[in-house]
Every structure is written in C-alpha cells, then in structure tokens.
Image (tube, helix red, strand yellow):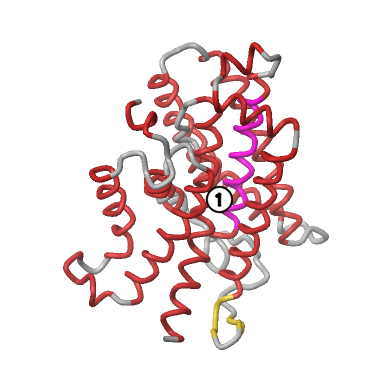
Amino acid sequence: MISLLEVVFRGLGQGSIYALIALGFVIIYKSSRVISFAQPGFMIAGVVLVTYLVQIPWLGFFAAVVVAALLTAGFALGVERTVIRPMIGRPVFAIAIITIALDIVIRTVAHAGIGINVRHVGDPWGLTNTSLGPLTVQQRHLAAVITAAVLVTALFLFFRYTRIGLAMRAVAEDQEVALAQGVGVGMVFALSWAMAGGLAAVAGAFAAAGRSVDPQFWLIALTALPVIILGGLDSLVGAVVAGLAIGVVQALAAAYPAYVAFLGSNASLIVPWLVMLLVLVVRPYGLFGTREVERV
C-alpha cells in the first residue's frame, strides 16, 4: 500500500507540471478561442533561460525561475502583439496553423541555446528523497506539487477578485458584449498569452529538475494535449484535475507494467494518448468542458 501511495504521489508531481502547461492552453483558448500550439516552444525557451540564469553566482534556482518566467511572459506578449494581433478577425484555423509555425521557430532557436553540451537547471533537489509521513518521495515532486498548488490558487484568486481577472472572464463569456462594456479585449488577449508563457516556463523548469535539458525536452509539453482534451478545452478546473489524473495514470503504468503489458514496453508514454482517444469518442468536450466547444 505504501509503495502504491508513493507511485501516486510521483504521478501527482508529474501531473502538476502537466496542469501548469495545460492552464496556458486553456487561458489562451478562453480569451481568444484559439488553441496555441506554441506552448511547447515557450516551455523550452523558458527552460533554456533558466539554465543560463542559474550560472549567475548571486542568482539561485528560484530567482532564476522567476526571472525566466517573466522574460518568457514578455516574449509571449510580444509574439501576440506582433504576430497574432494582426490576425484578429481571420479564421481561427489559420491562427492555429500560425502558432504551429511559431512553435517550430521558437524551438529551433532554443535548441541553438542548448548546443551540444548537457545543460541543467541547477535545481536544489536533484533526485534526493525525503520523508512525507510514512512515504518516501522525491523532493522535486514535492516541490512541483507545492509550486503548482500556489500558482493555481493565485490564478483562481486573480480571476475571482481582481478587475483584470473579471475582464478576462467577461471576454471568455462573450467578446462582443465585453467590448461593448468597455473591456479592453486586446489587452486581455495579450495578458492571456503572457500568462501562458510564464506558466510554461515555470512548468518546464520543474520538469527539468533532476534531469538534463536536451532538444527532445519539449515533448513533455505535448502531454498537455491529452490533459486539455480530458479536462475540457475551456475549463481551468478541468486542466488541473486532468493534469493530475494523467500524471497518476502515467506513473501507475510505469510502476506496474505487467498490468498493461499488452501496450508494449513504453506503455506509460502512450497511456495519456489512449485516454485522449477514449475521451474524444465518449465525451468529446471533456470532463468539465462545455458542449459548445464540441460543436466548434
């Protein structure tokens, strides 16, 4: 039983990272009805920034993550203003294709920053274990869970109690009505991209904890796609719940491969995508999404 709980906690740690990336997808979609496929690019861009910032002697890991998140948020805001803003009014499909191109460009530039040497984010935990009651868990997973909990709480308080958060909720409900009420829709679009970029950078930094950063690192962000399908494309709550659920399922598949032997030796890698296919067939709008999204 203890070992099972340790596996579940490991999954929650990984799922926390998926949830942060998925929140970026959902925030942009709710404000602009566009699925931004540039999130993996922003994630690896933020991670590469962290690997360089931690080399500054007086700047520790946490400060490096904060600075990288702010820089990535500013970069994402600039991308929205220069590339996405001129496309307002164009078909959503065309904008989505542009985000794919953006992702490729950003990742290619970020890979140049990685180079041929192994890079690390300099996390203070590595693969060190710690005791959590009767459980033995890795400190990096505990840090990811705590960080995700703090950020998710801050986001919900922001959307619930601030004027800007209220404006973003209004735009998510009806852009034309919000515009008629004096809400700066363009400001909301820009802010949603900045928030998504910052979240991707933080998620990437914790995903890189205890491992090296290589050109294939961005593949972690792809798992956010099954997460947003399971949780619902327009649901912040769904992104968090589904992210944790996918992380736990993936950890269980990795820890008990005999139960999913029919899926092959890499079952843990394909389980999220099998879940996505099942959800698309049974409940296309996800666990917490709205049916209107299914019709779109």
Whether residue 214 sits left or right of residue 193 in the image: it is left
Residue stretch in magenta: 188-205
Task: Identify the amino acid type marked 1.
Answer: Leu
The residue shown at (64%, 11%) is 180
Label 1: element kind: helix
Tell me the residue that label 1 is attached to: 20
Residue 112 seen from this side: no
Whether residue 296 sits left or right of residue 102 in the image: it is left
Give the answer, above or below, for where 37 lies relative to 49: above
The residue shown at (45%, 73%) is 8
Magenta-colored stretch includes residue 199: yes
The residue shown at (25%, 45%) is 282
Q: Residue 189 at x, y = what percent?
A: 61, 25
Name the foreground residue: 237 vs 227: 237
Label the magenta part by its dominant secondary structure: helix
Quarter of the figure with the N terminus: bottom left
Quarter of the figure with the C terminus: top left
Q: Quadrant of residue 246?
A: bottom left
Q: Residue 245 at x, y = what percent?
A: 42, 60
Q: Residue 136 at x, y = what percent?
A: 54, 84
The residue shown at (27%, 74%) is 257
Whether residue 86 sits left or right of residue 163 in the image: it is left
**Pointer 1 local density, CA inside 10 Å: few below 14, some 14–19, many at least 20:** many
Q: Residue 188 at x, y = what percent?
A: 65, 26
